[in-house]
Amino acid sequence: GAVVSQHPSRVICKSGTSVKIECRSLDFQATTMFWYRQFPKKSLMLMATSNEGSKATYEQGVEKDKFLINHASLTLSTLTVTSAHPEDSSFYICSARDQGLAVHFGPGTRLLVL
Amino acid sequence: DAKTTQPTSMDCAEGRAANLPCNHSTISGNEYVYWYRQIHSQGPQYIIHGLKNNETNEMASLIITEDRKSSTLILPHATLRDTAVYYCIVRIQGGSEKLVFGKGTKLTVNP
């Protein structure tokens, strides 16, 4: 079946630094990828929709300058958390839509900002 | 906002069928019902989806009412590994095809 990977699986960084998370569709092309954030014991919150070759569409309340999204190819989207702060600590999950319109989720990246 | 409502939690005995309900009373005619589950600290896993007919696959069955305002996910023989949060999602049609998650149902399968 279709596989989506994320790297890294977990990362710890210092406050003020930037962190890049990669999302890859391993065996299919994805013109659209989605980024979610999940706090402990909460549901997934959609942050943005990433479209290959164009600017991402951010959900209301999500700062586009804080969470930089780049979808440079049909198999890779990246989320960069800029100037990370402890409140950005969360579980970040990406998903990718295949050409059959099915959506496949990555395993998630746990970010801890100290 | 999510367009579905689900019970917050449910319990099920191992080996028994788990029936998870979902209400989606405002579903549109061209919207599908999708079910995903999320085991602790993992990404969501696709289970099944349907439009109006009942569906079955190797994981589960999906029963959609005739008026399409509610559905039930059935795990025929629940195991301990089925303990997870189950999300019922109405898929928004459109170019972005984004999935909006509600709070889901925490299913606990007990030995």
Image (cartoon, grey):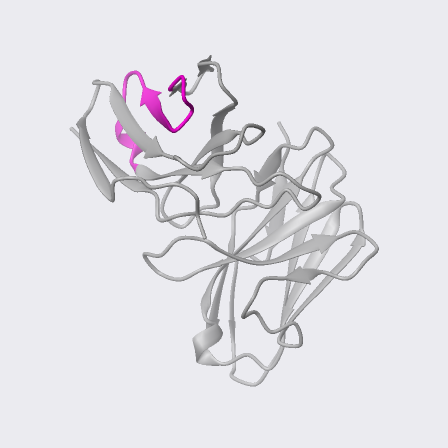
Is residue A88 shown left or right of residue A23? Answer: left
User: Hey, which quadrant is residue A28 in on the image?
Assistant: top right
The count of marks equals 0
A86, above or below B76, in the image: below
Instruction: Evaluate whether residue B92 shows in this view.
Output: yes
What is the x, y in percent for residue B63? Answer: 38, 18
Is B70 in the magenta?
Answer: yes
Q: Residue at x 44, y 48 (%)?
A: B2
The residue at the point 52 percent across, 22 percent down is B51
Q: Residue B66 location in percent, x, y?
A: 40, 17
Residue A59 left/right relative to A32 = left
x and y, in percent, of residue B57 in the image? 47, 15
Q: Is residue B45 magenta?
A: no
Please state the extent of the stretch shown in magenta in the rendering.
B65-83
Quadrant location, the N terminus of chain A? top right
Q: Quadrant of residue B76?
A: top left
At 15% from the left and 28% from the top, the residue drawn is: B111
Identify which residue, A27 or A34, lies in the foreground.
Answer: A34
Q: Is residue B77 above or below residue A19?
A: above
Q: Quadrant of residue A67?
A: bottom right
Quadrant holding the C terminus of chain A: bottom left
Residue A57 in the image: state x and y as whole percent.
Answer: 68, 60
Query: Could you tell me which residue is drawn at 59 percent across and 38 percent down?
Result: A104
Residue A114 is at least partly visible in this image? no
Residue A30 falls left or right of residue A44: right
Q: Note whether A26 is above or below A109 in the view shown.
A: above
Q: Nearer the viewer, residue A19 or B7?
A: B7
Nearer to the camera, A40 or A57: A57
